[in-house]
Image (spheres, rainbow, N blue to C red):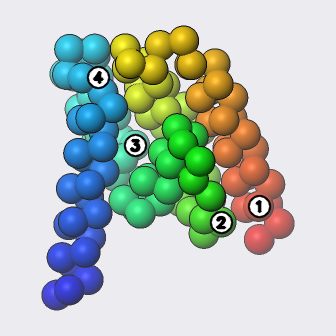
Amino acid sequence: MANLSSHVTALFIVVALLCAFVPAFSVEEAEAKTLWDTCLVKITPKCALNIIAVVFGNGTLIESCCHDLVQEGKVCHDNLIKYIADRPSLVGRETQYLKKRDDVWSHCVSISKTA
């Protein structure tokens, strides 16, 4: 039961972070729902938070999250990071975030190939 509680808490944190990073007026509701339905459900909340911390902060990538990221797929990864990077308060740093996004993806793919 505690495990379920921790998953629900982690999912809540991911949703709260996404809401904080992405104002509702910046994308159409249908686009946000599509991202949620097709992408966010493919990755654990722990790994989603870890990848967000790496791309948008100074987080350290948890290698076990690379498997989740590669399973999620490049299109989802690219779209979710771009979705967050398009927030008005992050304007001017999009190139930096998109480079970090690509670096994380390349690193995870290389780890997944050797595993």
Q: CA distance from mark 1 to mark 4?
A: 31 Å
The amino acid beneath tag 2 is: Glu
Report whether residue 75 is seen.
no
Q: CA distance from mark 1 to mark 3?
A: 21 Å
Vertical order, 13 against 24 (above or below): below
Q: Earlier in the sequence, mark 3 or mark 2?
A: 3
Can you identify the residue that label 1 sits on?
A: 111
Q: Earlier in the sequence, mark 1 or mark 4?
A: 4
* Residue sitting at x 50%, y 56%: 50
Can you identify the residue that label 4 sits on?
A: 31
**Which SS class for mark 2?**
helix
Quarter containing the C terminus: bottom right
Quadrant of the rendered structure where residue 2 is? bottom left
* Residue 63 point in image, percent of width and height: 65, 66
Vertical order, 16 against 6 (above or below): above
Q: CA distance from mark 4 to mark 3?
A: 11 Å
**Which SS class for mark 3?**
loop
Quarter containing the N terminus: bottom left
The amino acid beneath tag 1 is: Ile
Can you identify the residue that label 3 sits on?
A: 39
* Residue 93 point in image, percent of width and height: 57, 19
Can you identify the residue that label 2 sits on?
A: 63
